[in-house]
């Protein structure tokens, strides 16, 4: 089976729109692989901070990126929870910090870093299929994806979701600071020259501000069925 014939669902959009939860549920339901590409950029940001590499030192960052080995492991069979491992360390919690989100967004703006992570991301395309979550899954990494979804939601709703998530984890944060961080990263991700955050022309845009995960999931399954029916007819 050639890599191009392996189906991919690309899910893009800014943070806090529910891409991760949707991606994990789709992958579990379909029995497909799952790529959290943001975790790669976050882990690289985490590593850079560990090694005191400044975010504009492209040479050292590219060196780190070329050697980056990130492993995704099921936390427990059937739990749907993923553990992110790097250099033998469980970095799942650490990379979710605001500091790592900030580092990831700075590093991700560098074309050399994006290029260095391309092959690693594409290697996740394995049978029977892949659900990939990120910013440029449908526009760059898997431009030939079977189905492209772009999730959006108001910044206020996204900050609120993140606030609740962190509070549930016992982390004390300020809602205003979260909103400011989200707006700053949105601006950087959208303005960068290399693979800026935007919907692919053939992506289906879903605004999740007033939709729960179940409703978005049903919609995507419906779209996937319709694509597969159409592909079957054309064969
Ligand atoms: O998705 P997540 O919030 O974990 O991503 C963290 C950061 O990594 C984003 O703000 C973005 O700058 C970067 N990123 C990217 N391209 C991707 C995934 C993430 O530029 N495919």
Image (cartoon, grey):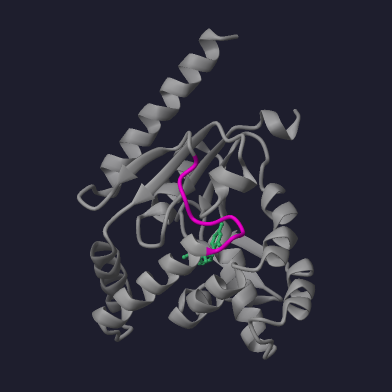
The segment highlighted magenta reads 192-200
| Of residues 124 and 62, the one drawn nearer to the viewer in this rendering | 62
Q: Is residue 175 above or below residue 229?
A: below
Does the magenta-highlighted stretch encompass residue 85? no
Kindly report the secondary structure that dominates the magenta region of the rendered protein: loop
| Percent coordinates x, y for residue 37 in the rendering | 57, 58
Q: Position of residue 68 (x, y in %)?
A: 73, 69
Measured as percent of width and height from the top left, residue 168 is found at: 28, 75
* Residue 194 counted in the magenta span: yes
List the single residue furthest toward the bottom: 52
Q: Quadrant of residue 33?
A: top right
Residue 170 drawn above or below residue 161? below
Spot occupied by residue 215 in the image (x, y as percentages of width and height)? 26, 41
| Residue 93 visible at all | no
Q: Is residue 222 visible?
A: yes
Q: Is residue 190 left or right of residue 139?
A: left
Quadrant occupied by the C terminus: top right
Q: Residue at x 43, y 41 (%)?
A: 149
């Amino acid at each position: 089976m050639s890599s191009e014939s392996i189906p991919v669902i690309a899910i893009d959009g800014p943070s806090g729109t529910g891409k991760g939860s949707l991606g994990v549920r789709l992958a579990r339901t379909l029995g497909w692989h799952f790529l959290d590409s943001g975790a790669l950029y976050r882990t690289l940001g985490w590593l850079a901070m560990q090694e005191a590499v400044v975010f504009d030192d492209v040479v050292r960052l590219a060196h780190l990126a070329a050697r980056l080995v990130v492993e995704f492991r099921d936390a427990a069979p059937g739990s749907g929870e993923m553990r992110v491992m790097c250099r033998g360390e469980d970095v799942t919690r650490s990379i979710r910090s605001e500091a790592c989100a900030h580092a990831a967004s700075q590093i991700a703006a560098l074309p050399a870093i994006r290029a260095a992570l391309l092959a690693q991301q594409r290697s996740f395309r394995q049978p029977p299929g892949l659900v990939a979550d990120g910013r440029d899954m449908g526009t760059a990494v898997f431009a030939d994806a079977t189905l492209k979804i772009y999730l959006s939601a108001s910044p206020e709703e996204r900050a609120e979701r993140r606030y609740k998530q962190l509070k549930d984890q016992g982390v004390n944060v300020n809602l205003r600071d979260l909103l400011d961080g989200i707006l700053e990263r949105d601006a950087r991700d959208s303005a960068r020259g290399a693979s800026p955050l935007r919907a692919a022309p053939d992506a289906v845009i879903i605004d999740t501000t007033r939709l729960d995960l179940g409703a978005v999931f049903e919609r995507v399954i419906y779209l996937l069925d319709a694509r597969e029916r159409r592909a079957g007819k054309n064969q």
